[in-house]
Each structure stands twice: as structure tokens, then as C-alpha cells.
Amino acid sequence: MAQGDGPAPVADLDTEGPATARLDAEGPAAAGRAAAGPVAAPEPVALRASDADRDRTADILREALAEGRLTAEEHAERIDGVYRAKTVAELEPLIRDLPAGREAAAAASASADHVTAPSRPTAGAVPSVADENLVAVFSSSVRKGRWRVGRRTHAYAIFGSVEIDLSEAIFEYQQVVIKAISVFGNVEIRVPENISLRGNGGGVLGNFEVDTLDSAERDAPVVFVDGIAVLGNIEARPKRGRLVRDLHDRIDRHLRKHLGR
């Protein structure tokens, strides 16, 4: 630099930085968005209730009326609410103070640490010999009510019908196997809603259908249904509104009634 030329001119500094430059490039719309702040996340949409959801809630209320948990007026009021409900959230308060409603809430809260039941029985947990055989040949056989379920039950329907209802049964073992054979016959199995249910089988010109269930309780019973249907039908599904825990309440009431308490 030659002496006497004076100090070099200082370049204009962009004091506003690149962010302002981007806003200028994007125009007033971007500036408006920046001034408005972060966009609020949309609220979650309430889950719409299905006919099955309403029927399940109505069944729970009907059972509560039969057990004396609800008066006729309370039942009528809640049933009216069931069929006016449009979302699942509107159905929940109607059964929140009933055992089945509390079980559903507990299942939702326990979903985080939920353990899936095994697909097959634990080795050695279930014997190969049946504790009980139900046979229907051109006839019918029914097992229901309050009865003790063995570890293995075999059902044979040959041109007949076998019904196994576990909704009020006493489970002494955590793993239970039901083996069903249907030849031109029908085998129906009903279980409480709060147990786990697994199926393994098929049909030859027939139907084998098991509704898989997973209980939220770690120590809940697991029912394994194995079988084959030849020109027949085998199905296993939960009985709405029936829970294993409900049985203890009924036993307590029965004992208090007969002991005069």
C-alpha cells in the first residue's frame, strides 16, 4: 500500500446474518410464519366406537344388573348412553366402576410392561394324558358353570356337539390345553376375557377358528386350543363381560349367604 493513500475502506458487514437473508429470499410469507411462532400440533382424533364396542359394553352392563351391581334405573340410563355414544371414550365412563371396566383400564395401563403369552405350552407343564374327555357321538356334551379345569381336556364331536364354557371355571393351573376333534360335528369353547388364548389346528372341508387373546396380567391362565375339523367346526372365543376375577366375588357372596353373614 502506498504511503498517504489512507486506510483501506471497510466492507459493509451483514449484521443481520444468514437467517434474515433467508427470510428476505423467501418473502413475506416466511416472515409471517416466523412471527407467528411454532405451529401447534393437531389434537388426536377420538376413536369412533364400533357396533361390537357398544355390544360389549351392553353385555357388561347386563351382567352387572343380573349380579345386583346396578339397579334397573341405573341400567336403563347407562344402556341409553351406550347406544348414543359415538366414541370409545364415551363408553368407558359407563363401565368404569364395574369389575370388567376396571379390568380394561388396568389392561391399558399395563400395556407398557405387557408380556406376550407363549404360542405353545412350556415343556413338561401339561401332561400328554387327558384329565377329562368330553365325547358326543350323535349327541351333545356340555361342560359349564363352576368347575375345576384340568391341565388337559379332550373333546370329540362325531356327528354331535360339544360345548366347553370356561367363563366361570376355576383355573388351578396357568397353562391349559384343550384338544378338539370334530367330524361332521361342532366344538364350541368360550373363555373369560382376561386370560390368554392360543390356537393351533386346521380344517379339512371344515372350520377351525380361534380368537387370539393376550392378557395384561403376567400370571393369567393361558388356554391352548389344538384340533382338527373334518367337515365340521371348531371355534374358541372370549365371552364378553366375563372375567376370571368375577368368580371370586360370586363365591364370596355365596359363602356369606349360606353362613348368614
Image: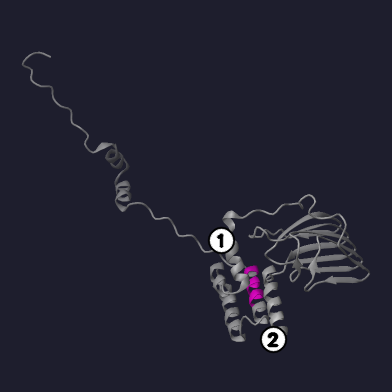
Quadrant of the rendered structure where residue 186 is?
A: bottom right
| Contact check, label 2 and label 1, Cβ < 8 Å | no
Give residue 195's position: percent from left, percent from top: 70, 62
Quadrant of the rendered structure where residue 202 is?
A: bottom right
Residue ID at (68%, 66%)? 193
Q: Which mark is residue 109?
A: 1
Question: What amino acid is at disc 1?
Answer: Ser
Quadrant of the rendered structure where residue 137 is?
A: bottom right
Give residue 139's position: percent from left, percent from top: 92, 71
Q: Which of 96 and 51 is in front in this view?
A: 96
The quarter of the image holding the C terminus is: bottom right
Give residue 177's position: percent from left, percent from top: 80, 58
Q: Which mark is residue 28?
A: none
Q: Nearer the viewer, residue 173 or 19?
A: 173
Q: Is residue 12 left or right of residue 88?
A: left
Q: Distance between the residues labelled 2 and 1?
A: 39 Å
Residue 210 on the magenta span: no
Give residue 131's position: percent from left, percent from top: 86, 62
Q: In this view, does 129 lie above or below 139?
A: above
Residue ID at (31%, 53%)? 36
The residue positioned farthest toward the right in the image shown = 138
Q: Mark 2 points at which residue?
A: 260
The quarter of the image holding the N terminus is: top left
The residue positioned farthest toward the top in the image shown = 2
- Give the SS element for disc 1: helix
Residue count near mark 2 (Cα–Cα under 10 Å), binned few <14, some 14–19, many ≥20: few
Q: Earlier in the sequence, mark 2 or mark 1?
A: 1
Residue count near mark 1 (Cα–Cα under 10 Å), binned few <14, some 14–19, many ≥20: few
- Give the SS element for disc 2: loop
Range of magenta residues = 52-61
